[in-house]
Structure formats: structure tokens, C-alpha cells
Image (tube, coloured by chain):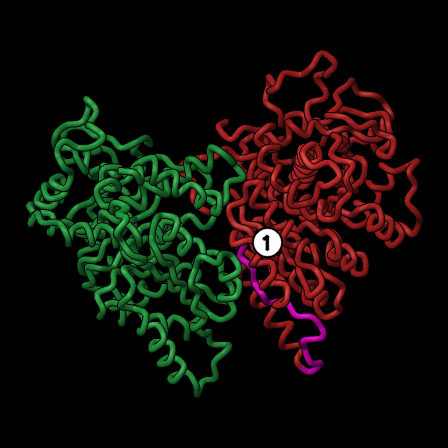
Chain colours: A red, B green
Amino acid sequence: MWAASPAFRRQLVLLRSLLPSPPSPPPSSSTSVAGRFFAPSCSSPSSTPSGSIRASHAMAGSAVYEADAEAVVRRITPPLDRSRHKGQAGKIAVIGGCREYTGAPYFAAISALKVGADLSHVFCTKDAATVIKSYSPELIVHPILEESYSVRDDERASVSSKILTEVAKWMERFDCIVVGPGLGRDPFLLDCVSNIMKHARQANIPTVVDGDGLFLITNNLGLVEGNPLAILTPNVYEYKRLVQKVLNCDVNEETAAEQLTLLCQKIGGVTIMRKGKADVISDGKTVTQVSTFGSPRRCGGQGDILSGSVAVFTSWARHFIMSNAEPTEKRVNPMTLGCIAGSLLLRKAASLAFEKSKRSTVTTGIIEFLGKSLEDICPAEH
Amino acid sequence: MWAASPAFRRQLVLLRSLLPSPPSPPPSSSTSVAGRFFAPSCSSPSSTPSGSIRASHAMAGSAVYEADAEAVVRRITPPLDRSRHKGQAGKIAVIGGCREYTGAPYFAAISALKVGADLSHVFCTKDAATVIKSYSPELIVHPILEESYSVRDDERASVSSKILTEVAKWMERFDCIVVGPGLGRDPFLLDCVSNIMKHARQANIPTVVDGDGLFLITNNLGLVEGNPLAILTPNVYEYKRLVQKVLNCDVNEETAAEQLTLLCQKIGGVTIMRKGKADVISDGKTVTQVSTFGSPRRCGGQGDILSGSVAVFTSWARHFIMSNAEPTEKRVNPMTLGCIAGSLLLRKAASLAFEKSKRSTVTTGIIEFLGKSLEDICPAEH
């Protein structure tokens, strides 16, 4: 039903128009002219055969369109211009890292740098900061968050206010923030992060919400409701909780695309990337997927790579669309493009890492291949 | 105008005289006898074509002379003499590293070692010290600086005095110090660093000022005014603030070389390297540039590599000039030579790192290539 809606058809046309003609690499003989960014798939996400990007003729009533993710990556990745200054390729911040978790925010932040951002910050607790700093001198780590155990009840208001002031003075410099990797579930810390999210929204900073950030917003939907600059990236469990909370029902694979569309609409225009065998992306208007096969390894941390990568690609997509003279392109949702590109890059990198390390593949090994994966799709000389 | 001044011509002749005859490697057929260290460029820094060092005949009215930076590196880099002792190839200290920043002082200090210094120290806060120590066992890290939050008001005077005493007992051992990488902007810490800078000046220790050190001196010009052993290395934003503060005007690209010369003169003989597409260097008498193409990646941290490298080359240049028997050479400014050499080395290393890692290039990756870059220009066996 949604596939035939005017809103969907309009966005599809807009997205198709993004690709320059003739496209590079040239379309295969099975590619229809209609399928530049999205090639329709007649299967549901859970039954989509794995493989590289599929392009075939449009099929009425198909549930999910396969994104031409390589074309998206090539289109939104900015050229490396010799006259540019530090920061112009992206400044990203990750809000996360507590007494328990330090790996997740590191993975997200270093991935942003390895995809091509110029500066990558982490805002975390003091306990986490020393460790995250020691993982890499490349990151700027702010030890400013606090957990309940370190704050007396009578100090909470003043500490919370101080934390917000500290983050706020940086906020407008960021092109995108990621909320959630290794955030934990400490109530005081989550309260502070709620304030940070509200501030980011007022400052119009795109916000990727993952991990414990999804726990936070599922219990406080107002934090993202009606925010078109919010991207949620739930895994199977986080998605289930979100559907139950927002739609008061269970996940239904038979109507997966419609359910995802409805979920985005109910939350008021956010973009959701439902992670799985295929990553399915909707902004409440279109539903697209990336099903390029990555790796059969499911080691923890891959979601953090994804959130950091999506943050960079989203900021690039926004810049691309805002600076593009074509009026049609200004109506394409850069959040969707950022999700498509991030999904593909992780899958490519995971595939290369698995080829090298097989069962021993871990997250740092995948991060090592982000550069080569991007280079394979979109060589830096171009 | 400045290019034709007697002071400029004198320094140009002096600098040319530095290169032994015949030079090694021999000049190409396009090299004029006039262009040993400086080959004139008729273009402004922002429009100079990238490429290796250019050498052509002198051109009246040209704005900026391209340094023969490879010749400078070869001339000032000391031979590796088997009879030398630890420390004779350079002892460098970086003043920087606070609660927020640990990567920047590490990059500067480790770069000094990788260029060829024998000992590299870091003076930073306690919070930063543990992390910087963990990056590398090669550095000597002194956890002695303090930020406002860790010092009671009534303790400030005594803490400040203790910090100065601690640094002062090391100061005379250093051949050059770098003030600023990851220094932060805490008022108490900056006060202490002001005292350290004054002490370094009294002890005649060359001082490279970068990052937050430039924030400090822009608000307190007396710290560097009239100090011929001070080198400032501003990026585009820091340069803009410096010009506004000292010259009470905006940066004018039409008269960039004259403005830079005037800036150096107004601050009383300091050397300034204005970083950008080309690095433009002046001591108020000559203006030269290094425009060898490095890398289009603008990841944070490259300025720290530069400051650490400039510190080493400056100490080598001073030693070379002071120990040279030729009276003319004693009048060449070693600060200028240090900047030229540091600029070229970073550009070479960044180019090699980019060739390897493309968009994934990060600062640690560039540091890995400092050694090869120097070896390519100036093999250690020679």
C-alpha cells in the first residue's frame, strides 16, 4: 500500500534524480532506468537473499526497495579538496561511556575518523575517559558525565546543570552526534543525557540514537518525537521494544515494511534503520534496505561502528543536499542517505575482515577495513 | 616591496650561501645558481601550484619565495656520529596536556623523537599524565601542571610557584620547548604556563608556540614580544585572531606577504609560520613558503606533528649555525630554517600516509612515515 502512495513515489523520483547520468559504474543489463538509488525487491527483509546490491525492474506491491547503496556513497562523499581546512570534512561527537562500558563509544568515535571525519569527540564519565583516551590519541575525550554513585542527592541539580553547560559550549561545532554507545542505564546519567538531547535538538544537530540511547528514548519518546534530524538504529531486541511501546503490538514480519513506516510516522518523522540480515530504513515515507552480505560473525561492537559511520555520512549527505543547486535534491532526506551509506560500508568492511580473520574477527579488525571499503567504492582521487 | 629591501636581499644571500657547492643532490637543469634555498614564486600562497620544491630565476616583485626545503633539511640535519652521547641530537619538551586533551601533546612529543631527537619530555596535568604515559613508554611525562578545579584559591600562589620550580630545574637541559599542544584554556593553568614561558625566555630556550599557546600569547603579547627565539605556528583561525589583535585589521590575501612581515615586526622579531595550503614563514625580514603537496586529509593532530618537528629542526639549525665557522652563516635565522624543514617533513609524511590509507588517514599513521620521509631526503648513512 505505502509503496504506491504519492509521497513514496515522489521521494523515489527525487532519490533517483540524485545519480548523475550516465551512472558510474555503468548499470548492468538487468538494471532498469528506474532503479538508480533504489531497486525493488519483492521479498521481505527477513527473507531477502544476501548478495550485493540488486537492481531489477519495478514490481508493483513489492515490500522493500533495495538501495543502490554504492551510488549513494559515491554521491554524498565529498571530494578531498586541497584548499579545505581542519573540520570541514566533519566534526562528530559520541555521548556514551560509563564505568562499565568503554569499548562502544571508542568504536563509534574512531569509526567516524576512519570513515573520514576530521575531528571526533567523546563525552563520557571520568572513569571511562582515562580508558577511552588510552585506546587512541586521535580522539578528544571529555570526562564530564557523572553516574548516581558519584553524586550526592543534594548536588544533582547543580551537577546536571554544569554537565549541560560543558556540552552546550561544544554543541554547535558538531555536524552530528551519536547518543548511546556504552551509555549504560544509570538514572542520573540518563537524565543528563536527556538534557543534552534536548539541547542538540534546539541547535538543529542531527542525532543518531543507538544502544542504551534507544532504551532512554523508548521510555521517553518526547526526546525524539517530531524530530526529522533524529535517526534510530535499533537491533532486533531494541526494535521489538520500540514497536511494543509505540504501536502496542508485536513485530509482524508479514507486514514488516508497513509496520516500520507506521512506527516512523507515529514518532513523527524520525528515520529508523532496523538492523538485521538486511538493514531496513524508513523515514515514514520510503522504505529501503541494504542487504549486501557482510559477515556471519556477530561479535559485539559492529553496531557502534555503524552508528559512527552513519553520523559521518549523514553530515556529508546534509551538506551535499544543502549545497546542491538542484531544487529536487533539496527534498531528499539526508538521514536516509546517511543510513544507506553507513550500512553498506560496515557490511563491506565486515566482509573483508571476515575474509582475513574468519572466526577470530573482532570489531577492531572490521574498523581496519573501513578505509579500504570506502576506497573500493569511492576512490579518494576522484 | 619587501622583496627588494636591503634586509631581505642580505638574508637571501646569507641563506643561499648555506648550501655547499656543489650541492648534493646536484641541481636539475632548471635550477639557477641563485635558487639554492629559495626559488622565487610569482604567485600568492593561496594560488601556488602544489608540487615539489620549485627553482627558477629570480623574479622582481614576486610575493613569496619558495624555500628549497630539501636542501635546508639536508644541511641542518646532523650526521649520526658514533661518538655522540645521549641527548646530543636534541632534548625537547612539550608543555601541554590537560583533563580534556592528551592526544595533542603526545603527537608533538613522539614526533620529536621520530624526527630524531634523543629525549622528549611532556609537562602536563596529573589527569593527562597517566594517559600520555600509556600511549608510549618512549616519553618522559611530568604530571605537574594543575587546573583551577584542582586548586583551592588560597593555594594558588604556592602551587604556581612550585610548578615553576619543578619545570625550571629541567629547563636548561632543553634545546627547544613547544608550548600549547592540548594545553586547554584553564585560566590558572595558563597563568602557570605564562611563568614557564618567561623562564624559558630568560634561559634563552627557543620556544615554539602552537594551539592554545597561541590563544595565550594573543591575549598576552608580552610573552613573545621582542623574542627572536619564539616561533608562532598559527592555523587559519589562529592567524586571523593574531592579525586582528596586533594589526587591528582583517587578514588581507592581496597583501599577505607584507601583512605577515609586518606582523612579525610588530611583535618584535618573532618568527611566524602561517599554516595553510602553503606554509608561509617570515621573521620580519624574509618571507618564504613551503608548498610541497602533503595530503588533502585535514584530520586533527597534524599541527602537533609540525610543532614537535619544528622544535627538533630548530635546535639542529641553531647548532649548525652556531658551530659553523663561516661568519656569514651566523647571521641566518635558524628559526626560519627549522620551520622550513618541519613543514616539508610533515608534508612528505602526510603524503606517504595518505597514499597508504586514503580517507582513513589519521595522525598516528602520518607519524609512522616521519622516519621514511627524512630518510628519503637525507639518508642516515651519509
Q: Is residue A145 magenta?
A: yes
Horizontal and vertical percent position of residue A204: 61, 52
Q: Which type of secondary structure does the marked residue at label 1 adopt? A: strand
Left or right, residue A55 beside residue B87: right
Residue at image x 8%, y 47%? B326
Specify the subunit that label 1 lies on: A
**Crowdedness of circle 1 by 10 Å Cα count: few (<14), some, many (20+)?**
many
Task: Indicate the quadrant where residue B188 lies.
Answer: bottom left
Left or right, residue B16 beside residue A116: left
Task: Indicate the quadrant where residue A339 lies.
Answer: top right
Residue at image x 30%, y 58%? B87
Q: Is residue A95 visible?
A: yes
Pick whichever, A367 or B153, lies toward us.
Answer: A367
Establish if B209 lies above or below A67. below
Q: Is residue A322 magenta?
A: no
Q: Is residue B259 visible?
A: no
Label 1 sits on residue: A93
Left or right, residue B273 beside residue B319: right
Task: Indicate the quadrant where residue B214 lies.
Answer: bottom left
Q: Which residues are magenta?
A: A139-154
Pick whichever, A318 or B221, lies toward us.
Answer: B221
Establish if B106 lies above or below A346. below
Residue at image x 82%, y 51%? A238
Q: Amino acid at mark 1?
A: Ala
